[in-house]
Image (spheres, rainbow, N blue to C red):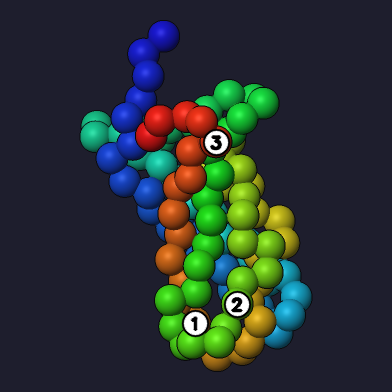
């Protein structure tokens, strides 16, 4: 079995229909690709999948609700993502390897 190396993480479905303090109706979908442009289906193991975390970059004072999702089946598995304010919010998504696993 050949291991894939992450080349990029892409937001393929942005969150939308978001309301203050509750989950967005359309959850974000992020996909990891290797250097050949192939979707990476699995990162980590069943017991310790890699995760994607969301952090608000701007505006200051806005937080994320449900900002951590496992990565499996070729995409992020968000189900309760939302933000604590309405309006335009800039969010950064990052991959996080399981504790004790070298990235």
- Quarter residue 11 falls in: bottom left
Give the camera-side residue of 43 and 28.
43
Which residue shows up at 71% across the image and 56% down it?
A: 79
Q: Closer to us: mark 2 or mark 3? A: 3
Say which residue label 3 marks: 99
Q: CA distance from mark 1 to mark 3?
A: 29 Å
Please state the horizontal and vertical placement of residue 13, each as a whole percent of the image: 50, 60
- Residue 85's place in the image compared with 31, above or below, is below
9 above or below 33?
below
Q: Residue at x 61, y 61 (%)?
A: 67
Question: Which numbered circle lies on residue 63?
Answer: 2
Q: List x then y, in percent, for residue 45.
A: 58, 24
Q: Measure how far apart labels 1 and 2 are at the Cα level.
A: 10 Å
Left or right: residue 23 versus residue 70 is: right
Ranked by sequence position, the earlier of labels 2 and 3 is: 2
- Residue 65: mark in rendering: none
- How far from the left and from the top, in percent, is residue 34? 31, 34
Q: Which residue is mark 1?
A: 89
Q: Secondary structure at mark 2?
A: loop
What secondary structure is found at the residue carrying circle 3? loop
Neighbor class of circle 1 (other Cα within 10 Å; few <14, some 14-19, many 20+) is some
Is 46 displayed left or right of 51 in the figure? right
The 10 Å Cα crowd at callout 2, few under 14, some 14 to 19, many 20 or more, is: many
The residues tagged by marks 2 and 3 sit, at their Cα atoms, a distance apart of 24 Å
């Amino acid at each position: 079995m050949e291991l894939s190396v992450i080349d990029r993480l892409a937001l393929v479905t942005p969150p939308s229909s978001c309301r203050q303090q509750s989950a967005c109706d359309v959850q974000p979908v992020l996909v990891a690709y290797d250097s050949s442009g192939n979707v990476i289906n699995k990162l980590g193991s069943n017991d310790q999948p890699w995760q994607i975390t969301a952090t608000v970059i701007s505006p200051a004072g806005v937080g994320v609700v449900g900002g951590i999702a496992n990565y499996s089946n070729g995409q992020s598995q968000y189900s309760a993502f939302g933000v604590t304010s309405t309006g335009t919010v800039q969010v950064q998504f990052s991959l996080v390897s399981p504790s004790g696993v070298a990235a």
